[in-house]
Amino acid sequence: MTKAKIDLGKVGLWTGILDGLPSSAANELCAEAAELGFKTIWIPEAVGRDPFVTAMRVLENTTEVTIATGIANIYARDAMTMANAQRSIEEAHPGRFLLGLGVSHMHLVEWVRKHDYSKPLTYMRQYLEMMHKARFMAVGPSELPEIVLAALGPKMLELAASQTAGAHPYFVPPEHTQIAREVMGSEALLYPEQMVVLEEDPETARAIARQHMKTYSALPNYANNLIRLGYDADDIENMADVVVDAVVAWGSIDAIKTRVQDHFDAGADHVCVQVLTEEPQTVPEGWRQLAPALVG
């Protein structure tokens, strides 16, 4: 198995809550996460802060944490801008930034950004080629640092394995991790995200899970992936218990730890855990509870 050039640790955090905090508070929260033992924090890109600005701000104000994008949208900037932003961060903070790239979703690309989303796989392949050809007339790495792709289906997984360091699948159960490992082979890096709810009451836990899942389960990329795994389309649309339990690990700390281990057993190299709560401000408390079991 390929040794990652950027050390993410075994278990990291995936979170979208930083955009809801003042910059200074976000920096402090990331520093606390690192003190807890979570080496890497994954941040998304949608319609909030620019993830490269967030990454630089956090890296400048912390010493231990690594920032990974989960993911940076390839339709948000051209390939040269993406490549040179990555190089710029690597020059300033070597080994502390991982660029995760993705094609995002049709509504964000066509409706919000007004770009063509007709051939995302083809565009990703061309985009990667253009990134490697991008001119960079500044102090920094001559070669592009490590990249991973948001990949769910077999074609994008194959592209991730052949043209980048590996894949960062999102909204996936461990059975997808097993399939991804089989598709990509033993050399590619595999960094799945796992949603978790620290609640042992089934009704309450699933209600919290559904509150967050409703945004994703209606998106074709995620729904189609679950269908490929054998889940019923109506169950996905209605967020039936069987789908909720597959995508979101809930229960005790031991139950969460077991689900994370399921991903490792299926072939993951690193798992980023996304704590789900009723209110965003309570997410860090979940980090504190999980840290001794996951990274202690």
Image (spheres, rainbow, N blue to C red):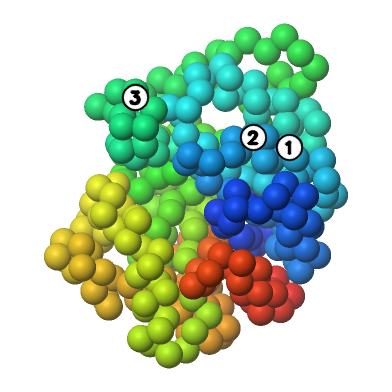
Judged from the image, the secondary structure of the residue bearing numbered disc 2 is: helix
Judged from the image, the secondary structure of the residue bearing numbered disc 1 is: helix
Q: Is 243 left or right of 148, judged from the image as shown?
A: left
Q: CA distance from mark 1 to mark 2?
A: 6 Å
Q: Is the residue marked by circle 3 packed among few (<14), some (14-19), or many (20+) residues within 10 Å? A: few
Image quadrant occupied by the C terminus: bottom right
Residue 126 appears in view: yes
Q: Is 85 left or right of 196, judged from the image as shown?
A: right
Q: Amino acid at mark 2?
A: Phe
- Above or below, 49 against 224 in this view is above
Instruction: Give the residue at mark 2.
Output: 52
Q: Position of residue 8 (x, y in %)?
A: 67, 53
Residue drawn at 34 percent across, 23 percent down: 115
Q: Position of residue 62 (x, y in %)?
A: 82, 49
Instruction: Give the residue at mark 3.
Output: 114
Residue drawn at 72 percent across, 25 percent down: 88
